Amino acid sequence: MRGFTLIEALIYTALFSFIIGGAILAVYSILDGSARTDTALTRDAEARFVLQKIAWALNSKTTLIAPADDSSGDSLSLVKTISGTPTTISININNGRVYLTRNAGPAVPLTSERISVDSLLFHNRASAAGAPRAIEVTIAINGTTYGPSLRYAR
């Protein structure tokens, strides 16, 4: 009977260890990449949602309360007519989340707990040279900045 020598067994064990080690590294890389992609997709979707809500607030005749002309701030306040009723809308940041408030109602979160909003900045650009007044919005989520994007107030 012929069996494996000690040298052959050590070589096969070393080769097997390298193959298993490579497979473990490949699986780890795939899982890590998937988690980073999921985080980026969530961050992008939440930024897009907040910017769409801001555009919704500014998409019709509004009376801007804050920020004042040619100034900046971390909150946006305006009066918008909804179904014929003047409604005060405020959008602001608090503890890493963006909130929307209608009149004196409860603050509704626009972002989830899965992300952290680093900053939210509104800059009110006054009308100049025939250009309409504009609200410039910049939002930073988990270290990624979105903006500045211009949303025109009519």
Image: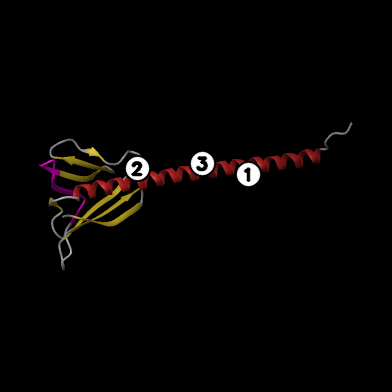
Q: Is residue 119 left or right of residue 3?
A: left
Q: Could you tell me residue 107's position as x and y percent? A: 20, 38
Q: Which mark is residue 115?
A: 2
Q: Earlier in the sequence, mark 2 or mark 3?
A: 3
Instruction: Give the prevailing secondary structure in the magenta stretch.
Output: strand
Question: Residues in magenta?
Answer: 72-88
- Between 147 and 153, which is closer to the camera in this rendering? 153
Q: Earlier in the sequence, mark 2 or mark 1?
A: 1
Q: Amino acid at mark 1?
A: Gly
Q: Earlier in the sequence, mark 1 or mark 3?
A: 1
How many marks on residues? 3
Outermost residue toward the top? 1
Contact between labelled residues 1 and 2, with CB atoms less than 8 Å apart: no
Q: Could you tell me residue 43's position as x and y percent? A: 36, 46
Residue at the (50%, 43%) spot, across then down: 32
Q: Which mark is residue 22?
A: 1
Q: What residue sits right under mark 3 in the picture?
A: 31
Q: Is residue 97 above or below residue 134?
A: above
| Label 2, label 3: how far apart the Cα atoms are | 20 Å
Which corner quadrant holds the N terminus?
A: top right
Question: Any magenta on residue 73?
Answer: yes
